[in-house]
Amino acid sequence: MIPLFQSPVILACVLLYLACCFGIGVWALRRTHSSADFFVAGRSLGMVVMAIATMASIMSGFGFVGGPGLVYESGMSSLWMTFPATIGFTLSWVLLGKRLRLLAECREILTLPDAVAVRYGGRWPRLMMALALVLGVVGYLGTQVMATGVVLVAVLDVSLPVALLIGLGILGFYTVAGGILAGVYNDLFQGIVMMGASVAVLYYALQSGGGLTHISQTLQAMDPKFIGPWGTRGPLTALSWYLIFGLGWMGQPHGITKFLMLKNPRDLRWGALLTGMVYMICSLLWMSIGLAMRSLVQAGGQKPLATPDLAAPIFLMHYTPAIVAGVVFAGLLAAIMSTANSFLNIGAAALVRDIPIAWTRRTLPRELFWSRVATVVLLVISAVFALYMENLVALLGTFGWGTFAAAIVPPVAIGMNWKRATGSACVASIAISLILNFTLELSARHKLFTLPYGMNVGAFALLVSLVVFIGVSWLTGQDEERRLPPDVKAVMEI
Amino acid sequence: MSDRTVAAIFAVTLAALALFPLHAWLGFGIAACALLVLGLVLGFTRLHPALLLLFAAYVVLLAGMVWLADSSRLILGLPAATALLVYGIWPMPLLAALLYGLLFRSSVLPDDKLEKFLAEHGRRRPAE
């Protein structure tokens, strides 16, 4: 493999790209004057910015490194993670877009726990939501840290711990330099580049594999299941991913908090369609690299990969022109950083704003200082978590995604649309989802117990959490509608 | 309508939990699909006929994919079932997103309702 620093074109692309991102960070820093600017970009986003930024923050290292790796490993199974995005985006706009945005019109909502506190009242729903966010952020941030490490190992030819150290340094610097405004506009910039890069990569993937028909025939000869609709992991795993990535989109805080950032509620109108379309375009990279690399290995034109996560870096280095590889590498690194920026923002807000408010009903003194401390702590814990788990990037991402989905979908997506939902149900469903996600993941890791037939832990936890949420609400929610404040009731009725 | 829809979500969720340990993947898949559809039903204030048509087409495509799963015939470069997944099932929800956009001003968030809401409640009070 050619290390990055020996390829001047790639290096130039990466440096130019990072300079642009840094410039956006400095520009955003000068526009950040209040906590509303810091947490919800001053509610200043238009529809196009919001839609593309949402797609870019969702795709990140999970899709661009983990996705192709998982296609290389298990064929079409992996695509059940990306296909449901179109229905997931639609669902989140239909169920949450209007409710969250209008709630932010009548209350000072800066974070998801703010919204939960307004909807349910009391301190426990806010506290539990903040706790879920911190735990989910650790898992998902671990994905971004690991993805950065995988890319840097591939291009710099260093060990994984050294690569993680470099990645952490870049992430830490970026997060301190810019707030969420920097993150959003970097996401927009990266999203546009990611779309162009994905179309270019599709062309080179098809060309290197001899066309889609030839790739399919090669893979069919190897194992018909690989290119079949369920892939090699089988239908139950594929369908549990379909469930967790379809319904679970409504539980991703880095996606749904962007509803709070929209300038005008009317801008919700075409957002779902635009986000779904740009996500589909970027998913072409996810699908095409994994299939082409496996086909090339099968045909003998490429040595088998040491680890599936190397599918994207090695394909870019060997099968695309340096300028395309440079742009995609740079876009990938920047996308990882930008997504991590969103997570650090959400996690730090939960630690220094939501938990103290829930506990003491006031914010911390020297909030900015403690936000920076919380940022560093979250980064270190995430790196340790990523090293400990030692999973593929995509599977690590699935754990983070599942933690958010199971904890957030019932109380937020159902709760914002069902007046009988109660705070007790919110607390119970978040608690059960966290307990299930972490105990099942750890017991699988230590080979004590795994769910049968490849059932995804997050999907299982989401189903149980839904049952608990609805069941407890029925038992405790007889007077809930009368308890709702008039503005919250109006938001739920419009 | 929300009470009935939530009751249906509850029943389908229980069914999914009961079906997966039996490895009844087809039943589990139907339950997963039903949950996504019920989510849309909960969010749309009224069921537009075009939405029902979309649901029907989605189910037909999913059934076709399952039926063709063992076919090795290639369609547009992919095995038949995979082609249905990539070229049909994947983009189809975008039509629901298109419908959301088309119905936005008439039934999702009409201008008069929004203006009335903002006039009555549009003063940002503290979250708690």
Image (cartoon, rainbow, N blue to C red):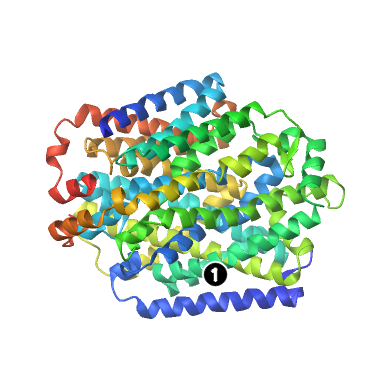
- The residue lying at 41 percent from left, 39 percent from top is B51
Choose between B68 and A57: the one closer to the eye.
B68
Chain for mark 1? A
- The residue lying at 31 percent from left, 45 percent from top is A128
Q: Amino acid at mark 1?
A: Ile
Position of A494 with respect to A392 (left or right) is left
Residue at the top extreme of this rendering: B22
Pinpoint residue A102: horizontal percent, then vertical percent. 25, 55
Pinpoint residue A426: horizontal percent, then vertical percent. 28, 39
Q: Is residue A306 visible?
A: no
Q: Vertical placement of B63 versus A285: above or below?
A: above
Position of A478 with respect to B37 (left or right) is left
Q: Secondary structure at mark 1?
A: helix
Pinpoint residue A362: horizontal percent, then vertical percent. 19, 60
Q: Is residue A336 visible?
A: yes
Choose between A338 and A44: the one closer to the eye.
A44
Position of A356 with respect to A136 (left or right) is left
Pinpoint residue B1: horizontal percent, then vertical percent. 26, 33
Q: Vertical placement of B18 versus A434: above or below?
A: above
Residue holding disc 1? A170
Number of disc labels: 1
Choose between B105 and A469: the one closer to the eye.
B105
Quadrant in the picture for the N terminus of chain A: bottom right
Within the image, what quadrant is residue A80 found in?
top right
Q: Residues within 10 Å of mark 1 (few under 14, many from 20)?
A: some
Q: Vertical placement of B10 versus B95: above or below?
A: above
Residue at the right extreme of this rendering: A300
- The residue lying at 61 percent from left, 39 percent from top is B85
Q: Vertical placement of A382 versus A429: above or below?
A: below
